[in-house]
């Protein structure tokens, strides 16, 4: 493995990982911060000559990650592999539906509301002064965010609005939610689009708000 490099794709939160390999292996293992991010067949990431490229999603924005690629041949991985540290500079709030290759960017610095609640009840047993907390489940992040919908990142306002409505049309479809230095898979709902006082002649802005519920892997191991 040689020539490993990482580059941001335009102004999006995604990166292209590119590397060289003189002989073609069975597949490659993409690692981020020492953990397997994806395993891909060599033919799916082949570019030309000895060059391979993989588009990586889901990294935390504005956060330095260590990227590494390992070749796999006959069930054995390459022993010596270069690594690269890279942080993706990202602005705004992003909703990315990779299944349909659509994304929406909301501008602004809304702090929003965030919670990570437990499904729990607190009891005080008879004759005791000590409360007992019974936890039935632990949930991921949930809350609400808002921002301004406008033209930008190579898309017109109409294209941004159409993609946002496409996300709203599928409340069961998970998206990659990116806000601040957070990036996680989530369900989004109650998407509301309303007029904005920022609208000026020749420009269109809309206020957008939505609720979110984290799904998939959580950053902790729940033992209940």
Image (tube, rainbow, N blue to C red):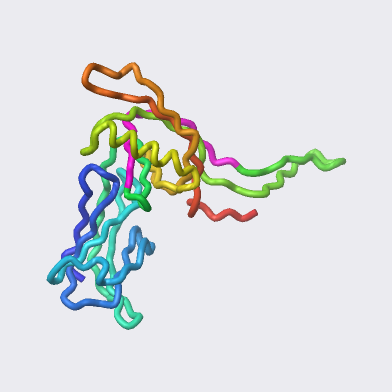
**Tally of numbered discs:** 0
Q: What's the residue at 32%, 49% (across, down)?
A: 101
Which residue occupies the foreground of this view, 172 or 92?
Answer: 172
Quarter of the image containing the N terminus?
bottom left
Identity of the residue furthest to the right in this view: 127
Expressed as whole percent of the image width and height from the top left, the position of residue 70 reads 29, 70
Write down the quadrant of residue 117 in the picture.
top right
Q: Is residue 111 magenta?
A: yes
Looking at the rendering, the stretch of residues picked out in magenta corresponds to 102-117
158 versus 46 height, above or below = above
Judge whether residue 111 can be spotted in this image: no
Judge whether residue 105 can be spotted in this image: yes
153 versus 43 height, above or below = above
Q: What's the residue at 18%, 72% (across, down)?
A: 21
Q: What's the residue at 74%, 44% (across, down)?
A: 132
Identity of the residue furthest to the left in this view: 49
Q: What's the residue at 20%, 61% (across, down)?
A: 18
Which residue occupies the foreground of this view, 13 or 202?
Answer: 202
Quarter of the image containing the C terminus?
bottom right
Identity of the residue furthest to the bottom in this view: 74
């Amino acid at each position: 493995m040689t020539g490993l490099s990482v580059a941001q794709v335009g102004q999006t939160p995604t990166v292209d990982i590119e590397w060289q390999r003189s002989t073609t292996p069975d597949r490659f293992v993409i690692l981020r911060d020492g953990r397997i991010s994806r395993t891909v067949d060599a033919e799916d990431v082949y570019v030309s000559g000895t060059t391979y490229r993989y588009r990586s999603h889901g990294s935390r924005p504005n956060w330095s990650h260590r990227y590494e690629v390992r070749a796999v041949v006959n069930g054995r991985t390459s022993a010596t592999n270069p690594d690269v540290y890279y942080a993706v500079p990202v602005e705004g709030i992003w909703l990315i539906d990779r299944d349909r290759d659509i994304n929406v960017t909301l501008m602004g610095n809304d702090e929003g509301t965030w919670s990570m609640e437990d499904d729990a009840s607190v009891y005080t047993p008879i004759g005791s002064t000590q409360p007992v907390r019974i936890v039935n489940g632990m949930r991921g992040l949930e809350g609400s965010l808002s921002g301004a919908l406008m033209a930008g990142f190579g898309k017109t306002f109409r294209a941004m609005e159409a993609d946002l409505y496409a996300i709203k049309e599928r409340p069961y479809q998970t998206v990659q939610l990116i806000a601040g230095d957070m990036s996680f898979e989530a369900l989004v709902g109650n998407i509301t689009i309303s007029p904005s006082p920022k609208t000026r002649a020749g420009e269109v802005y809309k206020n957008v708000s939505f609720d979110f519920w984290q799904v998939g892997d959580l950053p902790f191991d729940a033992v209940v």
